[in-house]
Each structure stands twice: as C-alpha cells, then as structure tokens.
Image (cartoon, rainbow, N blue to C red):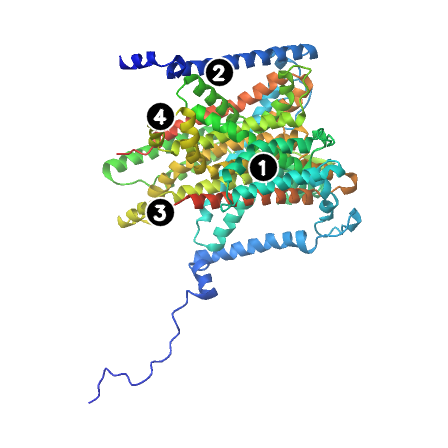
Amino acid sequence: MLRSSSRERGPLWRDPTFRALLVQGILLLALGAFIAMVVSNTMANLEARGISTGFGFLQDRAGFSIPQTLIDYSGDSTYARTFVVGLLNTLLVSAMGIVAATLIGFAVGIARLSPNWLLARLATAYVEIFRNIPLLVQILFWYFAVLQALPSPQNSHSLFEVIFLNVRGLVLPDPQPLAGFAATPWALLVAVIATWWLARHAKQRQAKTGRPLPVFKLGALLLIGLPSVVFVATGMPLEWSLPAFKGFNFQGGVTVLPELIALWLALSIYTASFIAEIVRSGIQSVPQGQVEAAQALSLPGGIILRKVVIPQAMRVIVPQLTSQHLNLIKNSSLATAIGYPDLVAVFSGTALNVTGQAIEIVAMTMAVYLLINLIVSALMNLYNARTLLKER
Amino acid sequence: MVDTTTVTEMVAERRPPDLRRGLLGWLQANLFNTLLNGAVTLVTVALLAMVLWPVLQWAVFQADWLGNSREACSGEGACWVFISARFESIVYGFYPGAERWRVDLVFAALAILIAWLAIPRLPAKRWVGLFAMVAFPVIAFFLLVGGVFGLEQVPTGNWGGVMLTLTIATVGIVGSLPIGIVLALGRRSQMPLVRGFCVVFIEFWRGVPLITVLFMASVMLPLFVPSQVEFDKLLRALVGIMFFWSAYMAEVVRGGLQAIPSGQEEAAKAMGMGYWQRMGLIVLPQALKLVIPGIVNTFIALFKDTSLVLIIGLFDLLAIIRSGLTDSDWLGFATEGYVFAALVFWVFCFSMSRYSQHIERRLHTGHRN
C-alpha cells in the first residue's frame, strides 16, 4: 500500500496516527495524575479536619427552619428534605421569572419595532438600561432600596382592603378548597385535552377541505367555560381566607416573602431585556420578501403575521429564548445574596456551614443545575431537528 | 378671438404641500399617524412624566451634592454626600494611602493599552496586544502585590472597590481568552479523547451557575491542595472565574472557527503547513477577527458578574458600597448606594457594548442580506 510504504520511510514521530495516540496518551496520563493528586490531597485534608465523607448526613436531623417551604418542613426534618425544599423554592422563583420575563421581553421586543417613535425609543432605553446593570445590583436595589423602604404592617398599602403590601411582604387572600373542589381541575384537564384534539381536527379538516374552524374562539370557550360550569354545578366549593391585621401582624391570607418579590422582579426585568433583543432580531430575520409575497397573495395582515412571519421568526427565537430561560434558572442562585431560601442558600449555604460536608453538598447542587441544563438542551435539540429548514 | 388656453391672471397662492416636513410634520409622521398611535403616544408621555419627573427631582434638583458629613443631607432628595465622603475607599478599597500611586499607574497603563488596541488608526496592534496579554500582567502583578524591588507588600485582603473589580475583570479576560481558544480548538480536534475532554469541560462550566463555582472555589479548592499550601482567597476566586468564563469564550471562538470556510485550512495543508502553523497563521487570525463582538459581549457579561465575589466575602465595588450602608453614621442611604453602583457598572458596560456594535458594523463589509 502506498500509505504504509510512505510511513515506513519517515521517522515515527512524523506519523499523524502515532502523534495522535501520543498526545491522547499524555492527556490521559496528566488527567489521571491530576485526579489522583486531588483525591489523595482531599482525603488527607478531610482526615486532618475530622470530616467523614459520604452521603449519610442526608438522613440526619437538619435542626434549622426555613422561612418559605412548599412542602411540610420543620427543624426535625432531614437534610435530604432541606435539599428538596430548596430545590422547590428555586423552581418556584424560576417558573415565575420565566413567565414574567418572557411576557415583558416579547412586549418590549415588539415595541422596539413599533412605528411609534416614542414607544420604540422607550423600549430601546429599557433594554440598554437593564441589560447593562449587573443582576446582583438590581436584586439588592429592589430588596434594600425599594422593598425594605415599604411601611410596617400597621400602615400597609392596601388594594380594596384585600391585598396588602408592607415591609414583611405581600399578603394575598388564600383560596381554601372545600369538599368537591377536585372536580374543577379535572374539568380543566378535560378541556385542555379537548382543545388539543380540536386544534388537530381543525388542521386536518383544513388540509382536506380548505375550510378553517374558529379554533381560537372555540378553544377559549372550552377552556374557560367547562371548568366554570363544573365549578358552579358543584356549588362553588371554594372559600377565601382574607388577611386581616390583628395585633402585630396579619392573620389569614398567604404572605409572599419580600425576598421572593425582589428576586422575581430583578430576574424578570433583567432577563426580559435580553429576551427583547432576541425577539426583535428574530422578527427582523424574516426576509421582507416573505411578507411581500404573502401580500401579493392578498392574505390579510393578521394571517400574514400568524402564518408567515411568526413561524419563521420562532425558529430563530426559540433556541436563544431557551438559553435565556436556562440563564434565568442559573441566575436565581443569586437568591443567597438577599436570603431567599433557594437551593444554593439553604443547601450550599446553611446546610454546608452546619455539616461541613463541602464536597458532597457542592457536588449535589451543581448536579441539579447540570441536570436541568442537560434536559433542556436535549429538548432543544429535538425542537431544532423538527423545525430545521428543509432545504431542497 | 380669445385664446382659452392662455392664462391671463396670476394663479392664487396655495399652501405648499409640506405637511410632512418640519417639527409638526415629523410629529405627525412618527407619533400621530394613526388614531391608535396617537393614543399610545399620549399614554407613553403621561407615564414618562409620572416616572421621570419624581426621579429627576430626587436625583438632581432636590439632591444634596456638597459637604462631607451626614449633616449635609437635607433629606428631601438623594444625598450624594454619602458617595463623595467614601469616594477614596470606593475606588481603592483598603489599599494603603501612600501606595495608591501603584494602583493609579497600573490602571493608567491598562487604559492606554486598551485605547491603543481599540482605536483602529494606531499601528503595531500585534505587538501591543502581545505585550498586553503577556508582559503587562506580570508587571501589574508585581506592582500591585509588591514585596519586590523595595515595594511594600500589600496583601490582597486590602484590595477593594473599583480597583478590585477592574483587577478581577482584567485577569478574567486575560486568563479565559487563551484557555477558551485552546478549548475551542480541542473541541474541533480529530482525536476523540481530546475532543471528549474539551466537550465535557465546556459543558460542565456552562451548565452550573457562577455562584456555585465560587462556592466550590472557596470551600473545595483548599481541600484539593496539600494542607501546607496557602491558597489566597482572591486567587481562588480568580481560578474559578477564569475556568467558568473560558468555557463561554470557547463557544464564542468555536462560532468563529465554524465560519471559516474549510478551503482555507485545506489550502494551508496543501502548502505543507503543520497544525499549529495552519491554526496560528491562517484560521485563528480570521476566526478571532470575526468574533471580536462576541468576545466583547462575553467580557461585558464577565464584568457584570465580577459583582458576585461579594457573596464569598471579597470587597469589590458593590461590596464596598454595601458595607458602607451598614456604617452606623450612614444608615438609610441604600438607594443612593445602589443607584451609584448601578451607574458605575452601567457606564462601563454601555460603552463596551457600543464599542462592540461599532466593531460589528466596521467588520461587516457588504454581504448583508
């Protein structure tokens, strides 16, 4: 063979295959040596400090309380439960932030393209101001400069004497489901499935006969109507626990922590400024010719927007939007700066300080974020594969 | 006979059709062209007036600007005396007063270097860039830390304020860019082990929040080294920041590498160039030029995130201001403090983003679809 004969002539270290093996061998050795060194150092250090390794501590009693818990939790709960409580709090603020940031972001992004000069400039100013200030500064600003300056519970700001805002947080009426309420969420689920089926049916019908169905109106009617009918038919089994000021604090109602409000505001406003830019560039990425061609077919403006511009813009927007959502989830870890009990604050903060199990705790915390990242990336790749431009 | 086509009288003067010109015309075209737009304009103006006027009143017209103690604050508007009274510590942290010329010198040199690299007309970019990436960090290190050439040693615990923020940002970029380039090249390598290592490394750092990285650097790093090695707190944070941002830098550089047509590398191969020659002389110069805006954007993000070191107890700009807020003489100036911090960060980040947009336009020669 030609290749092997030329290889025999040159020196061995000139051979690309040999060199690749050599480089990878060195990398493997270096990595192995590095890991061995780190492990042996860590073992020696842990022994010197008298820290035991392993995840046994997760079953121990935590002994500290957490100001906001979505599941039952007390000082007697285990560290494993602390972990779950922190994780749920992280997911709560992330979900709230993602919804708000996406809504604000789309509104601002579309406003930037408005023909109204003032509105467009205002949207630009919003983007330029909020994306250039560190998120941490914004969180601290909302928490210490705005929410800590609110009045004491006695002098709360109130809305119709039902919702109250004070330095200890936002007090909202708390819905208390009575017997028979369970039917309403089930009705909602049925309505969602029915709407999904309706949308599919309408699409098939239009493909076959060319006649569209008013899916939006029918779907809205289903989604709102069915649960309402069931709710009234079961005798409106819902009671509101209204907050009232008694003694030194509010009785009844549910209190939203000021830390949660500050974090939510800062995360939504900050991330929205990035989402706005993504939405703007996404819409602008649709070639003008597409709109002109649709106009030449004399499609009405609403249809052009819904069927021509938005589907093509979404292909550009969605991947970047998802990465912003991931950033928001990761950024929610800044909660620890104002003491919102998220995963990092209660687990990598309090639990780590109490137990000293630095390696296990930091590794578990990182694993959570990595896992979320990997799952969302996998879903994103699926979406990309489905919406990939089919080139001829 | 009268010629009916002849005009014997002057045509009456008419208004020129220039409704769309001038201030009024502009207003009509841009703000009141439809009924809806007019309504939007009015609502926006009303909202702006409701927000902007009180803010201006507070921040400028009723604010206290002069003085050096709390007595100077009238309490009607913002009291900027809070900032001016602590200006020295906001800039230098706890750096000893007699040694501050060293900080001034380093950052003046840094400013000159950056200006030299940023202004297109100045010559010898390559040598200045090389100096800035290699020699300058060494000189700056010895100047700031001291302990040699008769300079007094200043422990990093005394560093703080704007000076620490700029130090972290500079070290972050100088460290993460080369690591990022190597990682980006490794991710495109043909060798499975090298590629795998780079992919795992990049995706790991990109998947976790910076704050857990800083936690890891401050609580786990000391466990990884032999117990007799003293690991400086600032150094630990810097290592974490460098690794974290090198992963983001790698993805930016990879974008540039992918944009270079493979014909470039194949041509270089045909000329008999080795791997490092092909990369260093043909591919990287083109790729890096393409991604300058991306690098600047990463740098802006890095700069903003330097504020996170507050959480592991380093006194950067934000932390210095925050600690000033707990001073019993100056309680209740949180708004002034955070607004000032926001303003400083904003000025830095906004000018960098403008520069990146400018570069993007300058490099965008044609090919616009």
- The subunit letter for the residue under badge 4 reads B
Q: Are marks 4 and 3 on the same chain?
A: no
Pointer 4: residues within 10 angstroms few (<14), some, or many (20+)? few
Q: Which residue position holds label 2?
A: A27
Chain on which label 2 sits: A
Mark number, residue B272: 4
Image height of A320 relative to B62, above or below: above
- Looking at the picture, which amino acid does disc 4 mark? Gly
Q: Relative to residue B242, is residue A105 depicted above or below? A: below
Pointers 1 and 4 in contact (CB under 8 A)?
Answer: no
Give the residue type that dot 1 points to: Lys
Distance from disc 3 to disc 2, alpha carbons, whole Å, reads 58 Å
Q: Which mark is residue B304?
A: 1
| Nearest to the observer: residue B103 or residue A204 | B103
Identify the amino acid type marked 2: Leu
Q: Are marks 2 and 4 on the same chain?
A: no
Q: Nearer the viewer, mark 4 or mark 3?
A: 4
Q: Establish if B123 lies above or below A388.
A: below
Q: Mark on residue A302?
A: 3
Residue B174 x/y as whole percent: 56, 32
Contact between marks 2 and 1 (CB within 8 A): the answer is no
User: In the rendered image, which quarter is residue B364 located in?
Assistant: top left
